[in-house]
């Protein structure tokens, strides 16, 4: 079908009309239809251009509260997910990267692909961007003393690695300060079981280690006991890493029992092992660990 210049097809007209609410809420001042139409057409050319203005931030805060706050905290202060209230995000250093991270997630991490509509992603990105104006989180304690406690009294290196040095039984902590808030780190130290996944879902290779964490206890048919962290699992086999670092690959047909300690961690509580001041120092040290993994 041939369309005369200057005449919009019905489908484009519908699309433009549907965009009015989005364009209007993205600006503080009212816009004419032509201005909103032009903004919509520009967004098709550059979908990572974020909406601006207090109305867009307000709308983004509402979407964020429903879909993001459970991991990143109600005000972006962090929790299970990293703190967003900081001037620069390591994985999203510009608008396009921020939009992409929210839209597509981050492979190999706990950040999933979004199910939000495109305009909702834009609103959330605008809100997250606004969080960068907040003052940085103040973490009490001395990270230098915390580093000493980590290596000596805590003996944390026996299970965890930092900078490629240490154990492999527990999660690598090289960038834990970027991934977790100080409050989350403290909670993990005093009550390790509080943050262990309660899920009974099968192992998934596309999900990060913390979400897959599961302590298992196996007994083979010949009576051998093998306890440790599940490394991998499928219908017929399971791989278990002992505290020593040794990995066992076992066929389930060879096992007498395979007990899974969902929601439990082999990590001891440090609530009584450290004084409140020492806990402050250890948390401060862990919060300072912000190594950015190579892409």
Image (tube, rainbow, N blue to C red):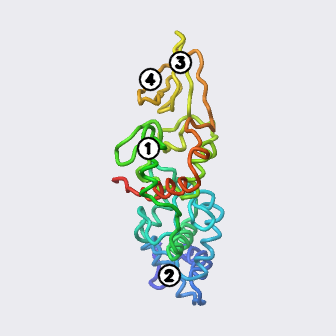
> As rendered, which of 220 and 49 lies closer to the eye?
220
Give percent across and percent down for residue 125. Answer: 52, 69
Residue at (48, 78) in percent of width and height: 41
Label 3: how many Cα within 10 Å (few below 14, some 14–19, many 20+): few
Q: Earlier in the sequence, mark 4 or mark 1?
A: 1
| Distance of label 4 from label 2 (alpha carbons) | 57 Å
Residue 66 against residue 220 in the figure, above or below: below
Please, what secondary structure does the residue beneath circle 4 have?
Answer: strand
Gap between marks 3 and 1 measured at Cα: 30 Å
Query: Which residue bears the numbered disc 4?
Result: 249
- Image quarter hosting the C terminus: bottom left
Q: Which mark is residue 225?
A: 3
**Residue 259 on image: x %, y %:** 61, 25
Image coordinates for residue 20, horizontal then vertical, percent: 60, 80
The percent coordinates of residue 212 (x first, y second) are 53, 40
Q: Is residue 263 left or right of residue 97?
A: right
Label of residue 39 in the image: 2
């Amino acid at each position: 079908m041939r369309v005369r210049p200057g005449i919009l097809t019905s489908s484009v007209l519908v699309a433009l009309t549907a965009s009015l609410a989005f364009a209007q809420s993205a600006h503080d001042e009212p816009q004419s239809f032509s201005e909103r139409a032009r903004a919509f057409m520009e967004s098709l050319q550059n979908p990572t251009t974020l909406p601006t203005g207090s109305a867009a931030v307000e709308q983004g805060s509402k979407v964020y509260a429903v879909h993001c706050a459970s991991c990143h905290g109600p005000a972006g202060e962090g929790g299970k997910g990293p703190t967003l209230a900081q001037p620069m995000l390591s994985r999203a250093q510009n608008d396009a990267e921020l939009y992409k991270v929210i839209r597509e997630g981050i492979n190999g991490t706990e950040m999933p692909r979004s199910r939000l509509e495109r305009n909702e992603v834009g609103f959330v990105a605008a809100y997250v961007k606004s969080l960068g104006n907040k003052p940085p989180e103040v973490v009490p304690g001395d990270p230098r003393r915390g580093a000493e406690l980590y290596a000596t009294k805590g003996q944390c290196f026996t299970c965890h690695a930092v900078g490629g040095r240490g154990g492999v039984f527990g999660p690598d902590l090289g960038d834990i300060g970027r991934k977790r808030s100080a409050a989350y780190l403290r909670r993990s130290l005093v009550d390790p079981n509080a943050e262990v996944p309660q899920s009974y879902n099968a192992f998934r290779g596309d999900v990060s280690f913390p979400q897959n964490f599961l302590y298992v206890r196996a007994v083979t048919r010949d009576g051998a006991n093998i306890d440790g962290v599940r490394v991998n699992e499928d219908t017929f086999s399971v791989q278990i890493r002992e505290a020593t670092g040794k990995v066992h690959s076992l066929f389930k047909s060879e096992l007498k029992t395979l007990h899974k300690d969902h929601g439990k961690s082999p990590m001891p509580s440090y609530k009584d092992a450290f004084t409140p001041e020492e806990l402050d120092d250890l948390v401060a040290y862990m919060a300072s660990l912000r190594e950015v993994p190579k892409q």
